Amino acid sequence: MKFRYTKSVPKNNDNATAEILKAAANPKVISFGGGLPAPELFPVEEMKTAADKVFDKYGKVVLQYSEAIGYSKLRKQIIDLMKERKVEVKLDNVGIVTGSQQAIDLIARMLLNPGDVVITEDPTYLAAIDVFNSYGANIVGVSMDDDGMKTDDLEKLVKKYPEAKFIYTIPNFQNPTGRTMTEYRRKKLVKIAKDAEIPVVEDDPYGAIRYAGNYVPPLKHFDRDGGVIYLSSFSKILAPGLRMGWIVADKSFMNKFVMLKQNADLHTDNLTQYIVSQFLIDVDIKKHIKDITHVYEHRANLMVKQIDKYFPQNVNHSNPEGGMFIWVEVPGVGDTNELFKACIRNNVAFVPGSSFFAGDIKPGTFRLNFSNMNDDQIKEGIKRMGKSIAEILSD
Ligand code: PMP
């Protein structure tokens, strides 16, 4: 059968991400590639207890169809989580999604016609690029520095593209760079967007995992006219397999969003929503996040120490204050897909920078994940990467 696919389906069968994950799946390979949390930190027993309670108390309810916007008790618990993040919201503003990835997809479906402009940080989250491309978007990147998206450049871009449909940003411990946007720039971004009447999609899966520096409120905190759509998730603070995320937005936007959510999957898994809600009653989530953060801090510091020891002296790397990623630039290395091949020969993996750029690819760049490997793997893996970089540079 010859299928006549829509424009949403990529023409070629290249799936760079799948290839990278496949190569990294070899048990001999130490992988800094995926964005995976540490599984040893998953609260398996506590989740099991919560699940038992839910089946005992609500068995017949949780196995039934439910509301598209999500379980109201869990949404109320999210209101409390948002309060701690300095964002005051009402129940109508909160919706549960099947991972924040679903919210990215639905928002793109709501706002993008083919050819529409989306403004993102450059580099940015690779699966967001894929989603925006699937709706035929024209992705325009804003360059970054250690303080996050350069808002002066953004200001020029919104003048150039006044019809841009939204600005997508990951202000905390960004994927892939690990960088965090300063408070000054957050306020400025919100103002630029408001003046230009362009909505902002603030994607914040990592913000709670801060191990250094000072807390910076979300862009949503500075939003006075409902232009900021805020996304977050239980993936990094609990477990990604749950596929449990949330959206906070203006009520009128939420009404439309829920209609599209209904089209996509009727509602997010009811059982899991109840289990997460019960877990939040039983377990001190703040302590759990503290425990995760502590482990990630140690791993990030160890990785930075090893990079400074084994990579060439002129290496540039981000110094994340939280999250799961370090962004590295090794001048002279060129296309890091070649470095990737050398690394695989030496049984170590990462994600080449080319995956994350919507526009021009910055040579010599790549992303390292530090959350998913133990101390010995970090020490040995970075050593192997240093050897691979030396091989590429001497070619
Ligand atoms: N946004 C960013 C920036 C991410 O890094 C990820 C996951 N890696 C997601 C969204 C998707 O998260 P979820 O598991 O909540 O769908």
Image (tube, rainbow, N blue to C red):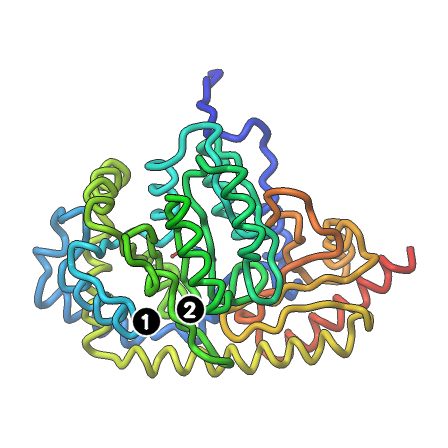
Q: Nearer the viewer, residue 188 or 212?
A: 188
- Left or right of 236? Residue 339 is right
Q: Would residue 311 be visible to someone looking at this image?
A: yes
The outermost residue toward the right is 394
Q: Secondary structure at mark 1?
A: loop
Q: Nearer the viewer, residue 299 or 321?
A: 321
Q: Quadrant of ligand 1?
A: bottom left
User: Which image quarter: residue 340?
Assistant: bottom right
Q: Residue at x 74, y 59 (%)?
A: 343
Q: Nearer the viewer, mark 1 or mark 2?
A: 1
Q: Position of residue 350 (x, y in %)?
A: 65, 59
Proximity of marks 1 and 2: CB atoms separated by less than 8 Å: yes
Q: Residue at x 56, y 27 (%)?
A: 11
Vertical placement of 281 versus 130: above or below? below
Residues packed near mark 1 inside 10 Å, few (<14), some (14 to 19) or many (20 plus): some
Q: Position of residue 281 (x, y in %)?
A: 19, 76
Q: Which residue is mark 2?
A: 207
Q: Position of residue 89 (x, y in %)?
A: 21, 62
Number of numbered discs present?
Answer: 2
- Tag 1: amino acid: Arg
Mark sitting earlier along the chain (1/2): 1
Q: Residue at x 52, y 62 (%)?
A: 174
Mark on residue 42? none
User: Which image quarter: residue 368?
Assistant: bottom right
Vertical placement of 12 versus 55: above or below? above
Q: Secondary structure at mark 2?
A: loop
Q: Would residue 51 be visible to someone looking at this image?
A: no
- Tag 2: amino acid: Gly
Q: Position of residue 36 (x, y in %)?
A: 49, 63
Q: Which residue is mark 1?
A: 85
Residues packed near mark 2 inside 10 Å, few (<14), some (14 to 19) or many (20 plus): many
